[in-house]
Image (tube, grey):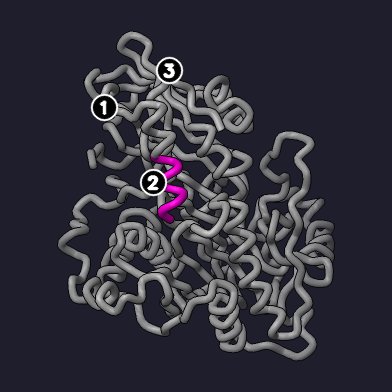
Amino acid sequence: MLRTAIPPASLAGWQLSEDIDGAVLTALVGCGAMQQSWRFVNTGNGEAAFNMALDEALLLLHEAGAALPTLRVYGWCQPTLSLGYAQNARQEVDLAACQAQGVAVVRRPTGGRAVLHDQEVTYSVVMPLLADGPSTTTEHYRRIGMALAAALQSLGIPVHLARPQVRTAPVRTPASPACFAALSRYELSAAGKKIVGSAQKRAQRALLQHGSIPLWMDRQRLFQCLRVPPERREALVQEAYTTMGAVNEIAPTPVTLPAVQDALRQGFSTTFGVELVETSISPAEWRLAQHLRTMKYATDTWNHDGAAAWRQRQPVASV
Amino acid sequence: MEFPANLRYTKEHEWARQEGNRVVVGITDYAQKELGDVVFVELPEVGTTIEAMGTFGVVESVKAVSDLYAPVSGTIVEANTILEDQPELVNASPYGQGWMVVIEAANPEEFQQLLTAAAYQAYVAQEKSSR
């Protein structure tokens, strides 16, 4: 485990060695900037399945040594409910209500709970596991959380990193299907409300962390998309006003999407001591993302039936 | 950190224990410490055939998903379904109650090719220092 071998089921028909652009690799290695520079890419609003596929493609190709660490910012072509890897879509999501409201549903490669992406900045970070200190999951949340905090503080938002709590009982999956309903270790809160929700996919040498920074939040719509007892729905919406926050509900002056994106770039640069060079996604990354989109993230099997069901339907393949 | 001498290991941080032609598999103490509190374990159904170093499942900890890799090829003959309800056993007892699957080995030679405890311990130390 902890290894991102290219999952064979995901990559049937994909020849990694042939599809990596030699020129890109040469340029990356040749400039001697593998450690000092990260890439900053803004891929704009994307379709739900493609957004998730591209995040996984960035991780796979970075793990394979074919790309620099990357901070990506993006948005969504339509409101999208993203689910954690292990969530049961049919039990936890009202798929018919989502469709009726024009809300796309996609399962993430990462853990955690459901997020309604709409008026927000979505970030994803693909980076090597930390070398200068513990490389635990929690430590990565802390370090990336510091970068996110620096970004939001520069916009005048007084954010706090949630402190780890001493474990007194076994950790259980939280009761609410909504990500923003619970503050995890080293996630960010402002004015007592969770303001960034994040999740990870861990590989052997690298990790993907992506997350949602809402500028505005439609709590009513969130709980219409989730399967909750009808008599509890309004109470959950009201509770969400005290537990879930959005940037422009807290910022002293209205903040724009580009301002948050610029602040993120600066926050990561300062926190990790790297230069973030704005660039675009490589052709190999686009092609791998398209492949993963078709094979995985655009299928009802993955999104609705779950990861285990999707895995069972893949052809048996060896590495 | 424990590295029991009677086990073999993978560079992906699984352990393997040979019992006749069967191989019991779990994740190492080092792995569970890196991952943090495990909240979800996805294991294959009995009867599933797997390839050495192919993925056989997933663990989720602190909203982080990691793949599980099979140390040897063969057929899943047991899966520790208790972990569905008590995933925290992976943290509490990685070499004991936190075992994950038993594989009927297709090729016994693969087990011999896995890392010894000493080699795995050295690998972990080197991996940490080289990152």
- Please tell me which residue lies in front, A46 or A16: A16
Q: From this viewpoint, is residue A281 visible?
A: yes
| Residue A97 seen | no
Q: Is residue B43 left or right of residue A143?
A: left
Do the CB atoms of the residues marked 2 and 3 lie less than 8 Å apart?
no
Tell whether position B126 is magenta: yes
Do badges 1 and 3 share one subunit?
yes
Q: Amino acid at mark 2?
A: Arg
Report which quarter residue B93 is drawn in. top right
User: Amino acid under label 1?
Assistant: Gln
Residue on which the image places disc 2: A3
Q: Which mark is residue A308?
A: none
> In which quadrant is the N terminus of chain B drawn?
top right
Whole-Å distance between the Cαs marked 1 and 2?
18 Å
Q: Residue placed at 56% from the left, 86% from the top?
A: A262
| Residue for point 75% across, 60% down | A162
Q: Residue at x 23, y 50 (%)?
A: A12
Q: Which residues are magenta?
A: B123-131
Local crowd at mark 3 within 10 Å, few (<14), some, or many (≥20)?
Answer: few
Q: Is residue A228 magenta?
A: no
- In what element is the residue under mark 2? loop
Q: Position of residue A90 (x, y in %)?
A: 56, 46
Q: Name the mark on residue B6.
A: 3
For residue B61, what is the image quadrant? top right
Q: Which secondary structure lies at badge 3?
A: loop
Q: Residue B113's mark?
A: 1
